[in-house]
Amino acid sequence: MPRIPHRDSTVLIIQSQMKQYRVPFFTRLGDLLRADGISLRVAYGELPQKDGRDDEAELPPDLGLNVNPYRLFSQRILYHPLLRAVAGADLVIAEQANRYLLNYLLVILSVLGCKRVAFWGLGENKDEGRSEFSEWVRRQVASKVDWWFAYTTGTKAYLTSNGVSERKITVVSNAVDTREFSYQLAAIDEREVAKERQRFKIQDHDPVGLFVGALLPDKGLDMLLESANLIKESLPNFHLIIVGGGPEEKMVESAAQRLPWMHFVGPKFGREKALFFKMANALLLPGRVGLVVLDAFAAGLPLITVDVPYHGPEMEYLANGENGLVAENYASAYASQVVTLFSSASLQGKLRQAALEAGGMYSIDAMVGSFREGIHACLRLGALGFNPN
């Protein structure tokens, strides 16, 4: 390996919390950087209280740095006490978030040339209820750091439209560990699937819709339940399985208790989650779509969602009519799309094949590789005296 001018550098990545789906990414990134002579530490905090999703995780002590952030103004502002770790790092990569107080210090240090700083994230905040002032701040700060790790090409387009030089953006194609998920899917045979379907009193040819995700208001759970009843009217043997946890859990659980064809199973991970994907004919998500689209691709499941402005950037991976479907944002239109899919074996086959092919385009290994290249490019800035602006 040729000599790397920034060997023995230290990179600090700051996360608000550690999720299970991020552990493989940070572990592999740390291994690759270590082989390059670069040390990685990932600092993250804990939620002040459980939110029902049961998806928190920890990193190994040599990689992770667990901190207890200070929470101000009813937790709207967070301060991570990481000044010593920041001082010892050659590059600090922080989540792009207005509410993280430490980010403003990092931006100042970057502007003054005292510290190499990068952001990573989704770019534009499309959440409902976002404030115009908050978005203005987001746009002003975006161009003030040394480098960007953009979730998708759409994120890159947003950044360049707000003054960020294209030369200091790495598109990482945000992903999860679908390779491990694919292994789990392949290890489940039809006998196990049939036994699980029998447990829920689902017959061999009954169409099954699956919801997987956090039970949050932006996931369209009200519409899912309303649409499910409409689907049931057209397809009497239809079943719906809901996997996940969160604030909307009581509403979902109440509906499942009333309806024998609706099955709420709570949060599931790994092989347990894979089994439900194997039982289903389509992934039903009439709300915000994020990384779950990659699980759908890995399982060869068409994802059916709705046209809303607050999807995650990973919605870019879904092509309407090719590897999934996008319905208008009301219950009868959504139900109609589901019924059309479940009534056509040829359409299901076409979307399934395209979903599997799309899954091969987005992997955690590709994401790790892109992130590694971006880290090297950013660390080279000082060594080469290069100003990307």
Image (spheres, rainbow, N blue to C red):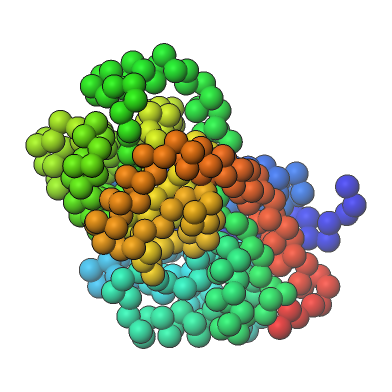
Task: Examine the image and state in which quarter residue 119 appears.
Answer: bottom right
Residue 185: image location, x then y, percent = 50, 28
Residue 251: image location, x then y, percent = 14, 48
Q: Taking 165 as reference, is 260 left or right?
A: left
Q: Is residue 20 above or below residue 76?
A: above
Task: Examine the image and state in which quarter residue 231 appears.
Answer: top left
Which residue appears at 52% of the width and 56% of the height?
A: 319
Q: Is residue 133 above or below residue 87?
A: below
Q: Nearer the viewer, residue 237 or 268?
A: 237
Residue 226: image location, x then y, percent = 19, 51
Whether residue 54 is visible? no
Whether residue 121 is visible? yes
State which quarter of the image contains the C terminus.
bottom right
Which residue appears at 13% of the width and 42% of the height?
A: 255
Q: Taking 20 as reference, is 196 left or right?
A: left
Residue 250: image location, x then y, percent = 14, 45
